[in-house]
Image: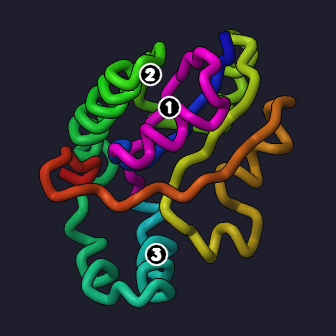
Amino acid sequence: MFTSVLMIEKPLTPADVEFVTTLHGDDPISFVVLMQPRGSKDRLLRAIDDIALGELEQAAQEGEEPEGKEALEPAERALTHSVAALEAAGSRARGHVVQRHPLEVLRGVVEETRADEVIVLTAPHFVEEFFHRDWASRARHKVGVPVLKLFSHSVDEDQPSAGG
């Protein structure tokens, strides 16, 4: 069975689930999902990304999003939703919320599970990507397996949000 470690920051949409579960054709796949809650240190970068994407209203609302410990419960709901969606699509899946040092946790999970790849599924982060500070760029130097960066789809109105 093919094993992918899937790093996410938002709940998976149906389009995300279909995309990651069909990347390898009909081969059975097992996912370990790592979900990181939002952090206040990233607020400025998120706002700049929102502005770059022309989403001024979203940039103005960055301060209203739960962060730190307040973001833990929404992140756990988003993780539960995402794991269930992967399982409903016929894949094995398990996961956990990563509160600190996501890249160190990622390296440990890759080693522990003998993962075949890492998939980083996030919204575009132009500032971090430009300076190669995004998860995918940093993970490529740490994990020893291929790292694929994919952009997530928008969350539908009826899905749980990592932000509440």
- Whether residues under marks 2 and 1 lie with C-beta atoms below 8 angstroms apart, the answer is yes
Q: What percent of the width, then of the height, locates residue 53?
A: 46, 84
Q: Is residue 159 left or right of residue 12?
A: left
Residue type at the position of mark 1? Leu
Is 48 above or below relative to 119?
below
Label disc, if present, on residue 44 of the rendered structure: 3
Residue at the (34%, 47%) spot, across then down: 13
Is 17 magenta? The answer is: yes
**Element type at marker 2?**
strand
Label disc, if present, on residue 95 of the rendered structure: 2
**Element type at marker 1?**
strand
* Quarter holding residue 160: top left
Is 35 magenta? The answer is: yes
Residue type at the position of mark 2? Gly
* Mark with earlier residue (2, 3): 3
Q: Dot 3: within a 10 Å radius of its alpha carbon, few (fewer than 14), some, or many (20 or more) residues?
A: few
Residue interval drawn in magenta: 14-39
Label disc, if present, on residue 34 of the rendered structure: 1
